[in-house]
Image: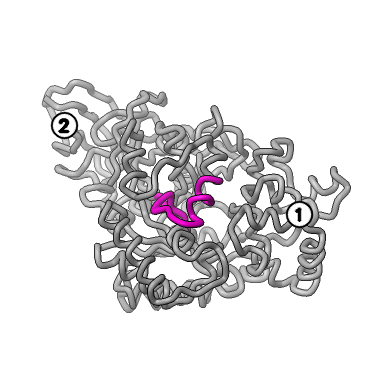
Amino acid sequence: MLDILIKNSLVIDGAGKSVFKADVGVTEGRIAVVAAEVELEAKRTIQAQGLHLAPGFIDPHTHSDLTLLVDPQAQSKIRQGVTTEVVGNCGFSPAPLAGAAVAETRAEAKTFGIDVTWTSMAEYMAQLRDPGTALNVAPLVGHNTVRGSVLGYDDVQPTPEQQADMERLVAEAMEQGARGFSTGLFYPPGFYAQTKEVIGLARAAARYGGIYASHIRSESDHVLEAVAEAIEIGERAEAQVEIAHLKVHGHRNWGDIDRLLALLDETRSRGAEVGCDQYPYAASSTWLMALLPYWAQTGGARAIAERLRDPDMRARLKQDQEENRVEWDNRSGPPTWNDILITDCAPRPDVLGKSIAEIAEAEGKEPLEATFDLIVVSEGQAAAVFFDQLEENVRVLMRHPLVVIGSDGYSLSPRGVLGQRNPHPRSYGTFPRVLGRYVREEKVLSLEEAVKKMTSITAERFGLSNRGVIRAGAWADLVLFDAQTVADRATFTDPHQYPEGIPYVVVNGVIVIDQGQHTHALPGRVL
């Protein structure tokens, strides 16, 4: 007897095959049969007339490392049809922890009400396994965390012994189950690292078959050089490369899209193992302190906040902004303070959803002064949305064969501590937004192309065998959606809204979303 039988579905297999009508049977966590008609008995039968059945979506770029410990039901992601998340991105992972990285991670975890009791990747993964998660989790080991553990957060270069220590930490994390190595070369302390340091660490992960995923050094003036560096690191480390949330950032650089596409085409033509992911929005999101010049970001988040208490430091930064306006614009991206929207500042919930310009006007301050105050009061944890991209560039990149879909978001919930922020809507809407807006309405992609970019391509890059496809023997990670109604509902001003048109989601053969309702099942695995 089958555990689940899905009847009369319109199957999109994830591998690019045209849509076909079939019944799909599931038993013991895997797909048992895919056929035009299945007559076997089942414990649960779902009549799927008019619904499309796809492999569960795989999100290659998320930051749910800590939020899954708060709410393992992964509400905002599982309701999108996401059945696997890759965490530990942008160089930040919750393990391994030593030295200065312990305090930094504890400070972030504190904002979620989490007590950090682990130090190793194995111990962190044990936290995920008990009590479990609604979706599968594939962790990466982060460069900034490793560097912070060995070198701290200052502008220093490693000795040969320190380089060896960092490579050892990466290797240990890989041995304990990490899927690869990530960098955040836009953030401290990653931006202090020279290319050769990163190559050595990526090579340490590659020896275990690990991927190299990178938030590159620049997505604005130097985006081409930054992409080229990521490619070089991957080739010299002999690792598959994933360029995170690819974009052309900042209004001065929007015209560079053709040069970026040419670079991607050249990379693809010579067979380099390089891929990219993208979220389907023309706005990014990160910590507010990322606006500051690199010299002001030494020491980590709390040190940055403490430094900004000093009036002399503020005066120096104001002068720096006046003298280096282009450099500041390249980091922030948006042309005006109206285009920076506060999404997280726990001590100041009154500013959530407001722009820096609105906050400054209400408080009778200069926008830069208001920014400094938010960084200080939040101990460096304040975050914002930056309206920094061109919508047409989003469409152009989405069509490129090397680009897959990823959220750069979190597993969140409208309730509890996870609902007390005003996050980027990508945490709730990325995948249905592609299916609704960019497939059905704008026809940027075909349905088959979009699903392939959400499933099998990503599974192959991250070595997730027997996932991302619908075929007998594959893991039963499945999503049923209505192609005529599926849509995102989350907005920048009201982001905690679940999508519509996704009535069923199955993870490892267990129904997690049943007729639009969460069953509270936690069948996810650490992959």
Residue 88 lies in magenta, yes or no?
yes
* Residue 120: x %, y % from top left: 35, 50
Residue 13 vs residue 369, the one in the foreground = 369
Question: Residue visible at 50% across and 73% down?
Answer: 226
Is residue 79 visible from the viewing direction of this image? no
Q: Is residue 31 left or right of residue 173?
A: left
**Quarter of the rendering containing residue 315:** bottom right
Give the residue type at disc 1: Arg
Question: Residue visible at 28% across and 47% down?
Answer: 527
- Quadrant location of the N terminus in the rendered image: top left
Residue wearing tag 1 = 309
* Residue 303 drawn above or below residue 110: below
* Residue 286: x %, y % from top left: 59, 53
* Residue 450 drawn above or below residue 112: below
Look at the image and give the residue range highlighted in magenta.
87-107
Give the residue type at disc 2: Thr
* Residue 355: x %, y % from top left: 74, 47
Q: Is residue 467 left or right of residue 120?
A: left
**Quick one: SS at disc 1?**
loop
